[in-house]
Every structure is written in structure tokens, then in C-alpha cells.
Amino acid sequence: MASTGPLRFVPLGGLGEIGMNCMAIEHEDARILIDCGVSFDSRGLGVDVFHADFRWLLAAKERLAAVIVTHGHEDHIGALPFLLRDCPVPVYGPPYAIALARERLTEHAPGALDLLRVIRPGDRLAIGPFEIEPYRVTHSMPDCTGLILRTPHGVVVHTGDFKIDPQPTDGEHFALERLARLREEEGVRLLLSDSTNAMVEGTSGAEQAVADRLHELVDGAPGRVVVSMFASNVHRIRALAEAAKRTHRKLCLMGRSLEMHARIAELAGYLPDLSAIRIPRELAQSTPRDRLLVLATGTQGEAPAALTRLAQNAHPELRLEPGDRVIHSARIIPGNESHVYALLDRLERAGIDVRWARMDPAIHASGHAHRGEQRALIEHLRPRSFLPVHGTFMHLKRHAELARECGVEDVVTVENGTVVELDEGGLRVAGRVPVGRTYRELGARVPERVIADRKLMAELGLAVVTVLVDDRGRPLGACDLLTRGVVHEDLQQELLDDACDAVLEALESAAWIVERPSEDDLEIEAKRALKRFFAHRLGRKPLCYAVVLKHPSGRG
């Protein structure tokens, strides 16, 4: 194909971080978006999710022709409703991902439901100067794909999230033969590859081996068995359903996300005969202990999740007893260790037999390729150029080093916002675009200033002073000071009195430029005085506010 301009890659999310995957690819006036995901905020600031800032996309939204999603994880599809509200373009993806996207759009953007389109491995979709062909990859959920992109500057292969599982439990093998034909017939100009486990040697392991080990642990348990797992891992749900059937146990799902994935997967044929062994939560307690297998959400110690409530003996449908077994069949996400360890420790104290990956590595396998698989894919495709994606800068850098070890000389490592161009001369950095995060609470946008205030209140506390003044700005009597999270209760009254005195003194001694200052001027002065006081007495400044009220009959 003739070309007058370079191919441009613009990462808005997912490079320099884990999650929030979102990358634009453009040539001249045509643009497509690969994935549109969210991440989850663990700071306890009332934020449900955050996603890439779409300002750059929306500034020229007429150029965006389509969104192509690789699979159905939230960090790849979760932000679709928020983009499609402002930029209604077709969304193409594999069937399971589209079914999950339909759930998200029904909740947050029902008007965009008719934009969803199914595209399967082997299909070819022409969009402007691009031809898109999905190919099968193995990962930790059903129906995952990478993308073959035929562009004016050659073939670009995008892996999506992947591992190379030699024994996929659904029989859907990684499409290595298809990629081998692609390499021989067309060549690969550029590979964009998942870097999530670029610092882990070896291979990620087979999901079938995990299924076999979980069956052993369920079969050998004398009491109830609870398996905590990521809800989207339908492969593991299917394996545990089979384990329940073979050990004559009933299967109970606890957690809204587990129930959603089970419902969609059953309708799509991924979980055949699930209803024959499944029981509702209400029957869990009355089911004989040695005949119950529970799947529970809460692998990261989340406060409202099923596993946490079970550990606290606060679940409304089930009470665990000494001798029951809990299997934590998931990775602990960095930063969540203290929450998960405390949860597992609580279960141990209650006499529960706890199994987790550190003591029994066979109970979990990552859905992301380790270095051995990453190396094998690079050597299999032999790309001329390489761009690592999906990972922190450390992950991206290590993956780039691996590509160079495999003989790829044209390698670029960038993070969100950095524009990369590709043409006959190879890869190069070509500027930046504005990037950032948009925070959401119940679907609504939360301004960054609100997040900053919440963070300050959580870290430093809040102080609000209210003062009544006359029309010349002089205080009329005492002021009122409300604090939250500032000082220990035993010291509160003395500190409040001293703080109020400091504010009153500042207002009384202020040399006002105008004879009758405004409420705004007075509030600024009172706020400054309050901050100075706390900085002097406590060595830190809470989030301070002042409210000044002028008394209509006040006289100077």
C-alpha cells in the first residue's frame, strides 16, 4: 500500500502502569483505538474506577473510526461506556468480551448498545487504511485474542494479554501456526507485546495443572471447601464445577461478579450443565459440610467481598467452622499484601485449613506470559521492530532488553503520552500528547480537586472555622471550630480554644485596605490564621476552611 505519512502509536493508558489499557493507532486522518480499560483505586477515597483521560481523543473525535477490544477483562473494556457517551463509534471484539461490554453499557451507557460488533479469530475487518484480523491467544479468561494489523507500513502484531498455555482447559490453543504462516508469507514489521511478567523467568504454567491440583484439594477435604478466585477466570470456574461433580459436592457462588460471569459464560456455552450442581447461597449453610464447594470473591482482601465476610464470621448465608478448607487461588496484587495476609491469618486462627500459592504454587497459574514465553513468541515471529506494552516502566524495560537479546535491533521503550512513529526508517519517538486519569464514582466523573481534598482529609484531617463579624469585619463574640481527624480527643478542647483565639486575633488586628472588607477577604484571612496555628502547634496543616458571616445589625 502506498503511504505518505508514518504510522503513529499513542498510548493513553497501560504503558508505565499495570491496567487501564488504551492505545490509539493512526495513519494520516484515520485512527483506531485498541482496548479501553479501567483500573481500580485502592486508596479508600470513594472512587470506583479510573480510566485514561480522553481529552486528546475527543479533540478530534471525528478521526476515531472504531474501538477494537482484545478480550473482556475490565482493564481492557471497562471504560467503553464513558468514551462512547461522547464519541459513539463501533466497538469490535470477540463474543465473550462483547457480552461483558453489553453488561457495562446497559449500566452506564444504554444508548450505545447498538455499537457493539462481534469479530472472531480469522475474520478480516477493513477500517480505513487498516485491515484487522484477530487471532487466538490463551489467557485467564475465555475468548481472548491478539490482533494482526495490516497497515500502510507493514504488518503489526499486537498480543493483547497472553500466555502460551500448552494445555488450555477449553481446548482453544494459542494460534502459533497462524503466526508462523504470517511470518513466512508476509513478515512482521512490528510486535507490540504484553510485558506484565517480564521480570519473571520460566513459563507461567498450564491451567490444566491448576485444575488437577484443585481437584485433589477438594477431594481430600473433610469439610467445606471455599476457593477464592478472580471472577473472570471462567476456565477455573469450569474446572471447579467439574471437581464438584466428581467429588459429589454442590457448588455455591458467592459474589456478584462471580454470578455475572457464570451467567454470561453459561449462556455462551462455556459452563455446560452448571445448573445441575449449583445451589443458591441460601442453601449453603444447610448443605452437609463434606458436600459443599464454595467459590468466593475477595482475593485481595476487599472489605465488602465474600471471603472477607466469611473470615469475619459475618456472611449472612454461611459460617465456616474449624476443619473447613479455604484455598486462595489467585495472585496477590502488589500493595494488597497486608490486607490479604491479615485475612488469611484470621482464617487460620479460626481453625480453618488455609492453602495459598506461597505454600502450594500449583493452586494458581498466571494468565500472563513469563520471560520464557515472551522470548518464544519473539523468536517465533522474528519482528523487525519491537514495542513493549502493558506494564510499569521496569516491566517495559526488561521486555525491551529481552527483545534485543533475541536479535531485534529496532526497539523503543515509552510510557503513556509518548507518541511513537513507524515508517521505512523504523521506530522513533515523535512528541507527546496530554494524558491523565479520569476518576469515576457510580459512573459519574469525580474532579481531581475532589480527589485531592479527600486525600488531604484522610492524611491530615479537616478543620472548619465559623466567625460572626460586624459590617467592618470585626468579630462579634466567640467563633466556632469543627475538626475531624486533626487531634486526639483528649487534647481537642484546649486546642480548639487556642485555635479560635488565633483566628479572632488575626481578624481583629488585620489592617484592611478597604473600610468594609468582603466576606471573601475575611475568610481568606481566617483560613490563613488557622493554617498558621496548626502548623506551629502540630507541625502540619489540616485541610482548612473558614466561613465568615456578617451580622446585619452589627456595629463597629
Image (cartoon, rainbow, N blue to C red):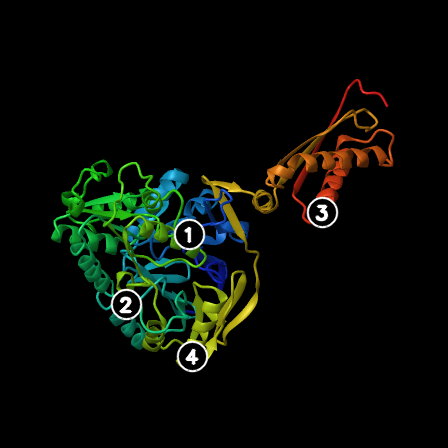
Q: On residue 339, which mark appears?
A: 1
Q: Nearer the viewer, residue 82 or 241?
A: 241
Instruction: Specify which label sits upstream in the sequence, 1 or 2.
Output: 2
Q: On residue 205, which mark appears?
A: 2
Quarter of the rendering containing residue 365: bottom left
**Amino acid type, residue under disc 4 in the picture:** Val
Q: Position of residue 471 (x, y in %)?
A: 81, 24
Q: Position of residue 383 (x, y in %)?
A: 39, 75
Give SS at disc 1: helix
Of circles 2 and 4, the one toward us is 2
How far apart marks 3 and 1 lie (CA) works out to 33 Å
| Position of residue 236 in the picture relative to residue 309 (left or right) | left
Disc 1 packing (10 Å; few <14; some 14–19; many ≥20): some
How far apart marks 4 and 3 lie (CA) works out to 56 Å
Q: Which residue is mark 4?
A: 408
How far apart marks 2 and 3 lie (CA) works out to 55 Å
Give SS at disc 4: loop
Q: Position of residue 322 (x, y in %)?
A: 25, 48
Of circles 4 and 3, the one toward us is 3
**Amino acid type, residue under disc 2 in the picture:** Gly
How far apart marks 2 and 4 lie (CA) works out to 26 Å
Note whether residue 5 is visible: no
Q: What quarter of the picture does the N terminus occupy?
A: bottom left
How far apart marks 1 and 2 lie (CA) works out to 26 Å
Q: Which residue is mark 3?
A: 535
- Find out whether the residues at labels 4 and 3 contact each other: C-beta distance under 8 Å: no
Q: Nearer the viewer, residue 483 or 544?
A: 483
Instruction: Specify which label sits upstream in the sequence, 2 or 3.
Output: 2
Disc 3 packing (10 Å; few <14; some 14–19; many ≥20): few
